[in-house]
Image: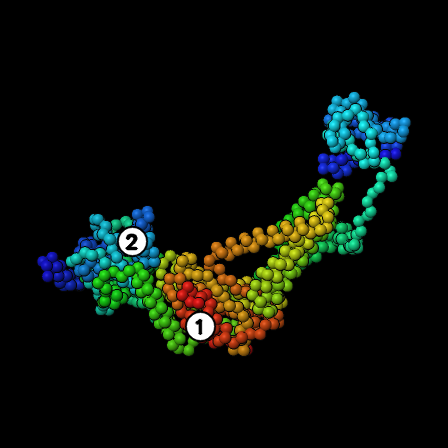
Amino acid sequence: MNPHRLARLVLWLAAAGWTAAPAQSTQEVYDRFKDRLLQVRIIDTDSNARSVIGSGFYVDGAGHLITNYHVVSRVILRPEQYRAEVVGAEGGDPAPARVLAVDVVNDLAVLATGRRDTPHLAVRTKPVRKGTRMYSLGNPHDLGMTIVEGTYNGYVDDSLHRRIHLTGSLNPGMSGGPTINARGEVVGVNVATAGNQIGFLVPAEFVRRLTAALPETPPGPGALLEQVGRQLLANQETMTQRLLARPLATKSLGPYRVAAAMVEGLNCWGDSATEQELYYSETSYVCGSKHQIYVGSGLRTGTVRYQHTFLKGRDIGSLHFYALFEQYFSRPDAPRGGRKDDVGRYDCRTGFVTANGMRLKAALCLRAYKRFAGLFDAVLNVATLNRPDAGLHSVLALRGFSRDNIRRLAARYLEVLAWKE
Amino acid sequence: MIVVEVLDRFGKVRQRHRLRHFPATIGRGYDNDIILDDPHVSARHLKLDFDAEGRLFAHDLDSDNGLYAVAPLKRVDSLWLKSGGRLRIGHTELQVFFPDHPVPAAVLDRAKPAAVTLFFSAWPGLLLTWLVLAGVMLARQVLELEEEATLGELLLEMAPVFVGLLAWTGAWSVASRAVTHRFYFALHGSFAGGFLLADMFTQTLAEYVEFALMLDGAVLWLGGVSGVVLLALLLYGHLRYATTLQRRRAWRVAGGIALAVALLFAGGLWVIHDQDHQRLAFSHYLKPPRFALASPVEVEEFLAAAATLAPGPDED
C-alpha cells in the first residue's frame, strides 16, 4: 500500500467516526475523489470534433473506467466513424479509450485507457438506507466537473429492470458519472432524469457484475455488436418468461374483457372521452413498460405496450360508426424510430380472425433489426366486428422480441379478449 | 356567282363570301365587296371579273404590295382563276369556288346521336349532376363526422371542390369558345361533375371489395385502374367539344394524358412510400360486420405469420 492510499484510509476512518456530526462538506468529497473522474468524449473522425460527451470513473487500478452504454453507443454501432477518448476531471491531454465490454440492458460500458495504477472508486454492494445523502459527479453540458447533492430513494418498482431513484439534479453530460456516498463508494451510475429533481441510477451491483470478468484486450467492433445482440436476445427471453409466467390478469372495458397489467413492471393508465357533442363515447386503457433500452440513433427496444379503446356509437348507424372506428384501426400506435440501417420496413399480414367466438379484423406487422439477427419490432392491431354500433380497438406493440416470443405474447394477448354478454 | 374563302395561316377557312355582281373589288376600304382586315392589303387592292369568254380573272388595282399567284409564289398583274384556285394579297390567302364545285361524300356517322350528350349539354343536366355530387359528398362527410356540425360548416368544407370544379369547367369552356366558337359550359361542367361522382363510387366500391374479401391492395389497383379509365373518358369528352380532334385521335390524346397522369401519380406515391421508412402497410379498411364475407381463421393460424413476416438478411 503506497503512502498516499494510507493517508486516505486514515481520512476515511476519521470520516466514519464523525457520522453523528454534520456531514463533511461537499467540497471535501469533491476534492477527495475528483482524480477518479473523467470526461468521456466521442469524436467524429471526419470533423475531428466531439459529437457526444459523457462522464465516467475509474473502477480499478488497471485503467478501466465505467460509463453509460448510451454515451459510447456510436463507437459500437459505427466504429468507422467514431472513436472514444477520455480527459481527467481537471483537464489535461485527452487519452484514447477502447470499449472493453458493455451491458446494453442496464446501460453500462467498460472502457480501457491503457493507464496503470489509476486511483479508483470502490463499488458498494451492501444495501443503502432510504434518505441517505448522495453525491452525483459528472460534467453537465461540458461546464466542467461538477458535484451535486442528492438523496437515495430506493429502487424503482419495476420487476423487469432495476433502477435507483435519486432525488437530485442529473443533467446531460453527467451520464456515466458515479453517484457516491460520503465514503466515496459508488452506489449507482448516473443514467437518466425525469426532470424536477428526479434522477435515475444504474444500481452498483450491475457494475460489479460487468467488471467481474473483463477480457484482457478490447474485442473488435463486430464482437461488441454481437455482445449487444446476445444481451438483447437474453433480455427479451427473460421478459417473455416473466410476462407469461402467470395467467394474464384481465379487466372489463365496456362489454369486452381485455388484458390488464401483465406484470407490475408496466404502468397502466385509463381515460375516457364522453363529451355530449361527440357521436360516440371512448374509453381507453393503456399499459406500457416503465423502462426502455437505448441501443442507438433513436432505436429504443425491450418494451411492451398495449392499448385498448372501447368505442360506443351514440344513436348512429353502423356505416357511420364503422367510418369512425376505421379512424382508430387505421392508425395504431406502432413502434417507430430507428434509422434505415437499424431496422427494415414493416411487413404485415391482415385477416379476419375468430377469438373466443368473436370475429376480429387483425393486422400483424413485423420489422427486423438489421444489426441484431433474430430481433423484431411487432404490432398486433385488432378491431372487433361483433356489434353494429360498438367495438374494441386493441393494439399490442412489442420492441425487440424474437419471432417466437412475438407469437407467444400475441397469442396470450388474444386468448383473453372476449365479449362478455 | 362565286364563293371566295378567306383562309388563315393554317389554310383553314376563316370567312366565306358570296359574290353575285361583277366586277367585284377586294381591299381594306369600306367600299369593297369583300373587306379584309389585313394591314398589308391596300384600300382598293384587287378586282375580280369575267372576261369576254366567261373566264374568271383577278387584276391588281395598282396596290402597294401587289398580287401573287400561289404555288409557285409569283407576283403577277393579273391571273386567271379556276374553281379551287388560290391567290395571295398582303398576308391573306384567298380561294375561289364556282357553285358547281364538287364536294366529297359525307362521312358516314356510325354512332347514333348520343341522347346522354344531348341531355347533359343542357343546363338542367348540369344542375342535376352537380346537385347529386353535392348530395353524395355531403353524405360522405356526415358519415365521417366525429361530432355534430352545422350544415354551413359542411358546405364550407365542400366549397373548395366546387371552386375547383368551376375553374376546371371554365377553362375548358374558354378553350371550346376559342376553337369551336361555343362555350359548351353545361356540357363540360357535367363531364367534370360526372367524373368526380363516378370516381367516388368506384373508390368506395373498391374499399368494400377490399374489406369484404380481404383482398389486400384492391383499393390501390381497382381504384387506380378505374381512375385512369375515368380520367381518359373525362378528357375525351372535353377534347371532343373543345378541339376539332377526330374521335380516334381524341381517344389517343385522352388515353395518353390519363396514362401520363397515372404514371406521375404512381411515381409520386412510390417516392412517398419509399421515403417513409416507418410506414405500416396494412389493409386498414373497416366496414360493418355484415360486409365481412371472407372466412375467418383461428388465432393460432393467423399468428403463424410471425414466423415468416419481414425476413431478415440472414433468413430466406
What is the spatial separation of the Cα atoms under label 2 and label 1, in whole angstroms?
39 Å
Going by the numbered disc 2, the residue's amino acid type is Arg
Quarter holding residue A129: bottom left
Quarter holding residue A20: bottom left
Q: Which residue is mark 1?
A: A407
Above or below — where is A61 with respect to B84?
below
Image spot of residue A373 (x, y percent)? 38, 66
Q: Nearer the viewer, residue A6 or A302?
A: A302
**Few, some or many residues within 10 Å of mark 1 (<14, 14–19, 20+):** many
The residue located at (28%, 60%) in the rendering is: A220
Can I make out residue A146 in this image? no
Can I make out residue A229 in this image? yes
Q: Which residue is mark 2?
A: A83
Image spot of residue A45 (x, y percent)? 31, 50
Quarter of the rendering occupied by the N terminus of chain A: bottom left
The residue located at (30%, 51%) in the rendering is: A43
Going by the numbered disc 1, the residue's amino acid type is Arg
| Element class at badge 1 | helix
Q: Nearer the viewer, residue A122 or B246?
A: B246
Chain name for mark 2: A
| Element class at badge 2 | strand
Above or below — where is A7 with respect to B174?
below
The residue located at (9%, 58%) in the rendering is: A3
Q: Is residue A121 left or right of residue A330?
A: left
Quarter holding residue B196: bottom right
Q: Which mark is residue B136?
A: none
Q: Nearer the viewer, residue A389 or A241?
A: A241
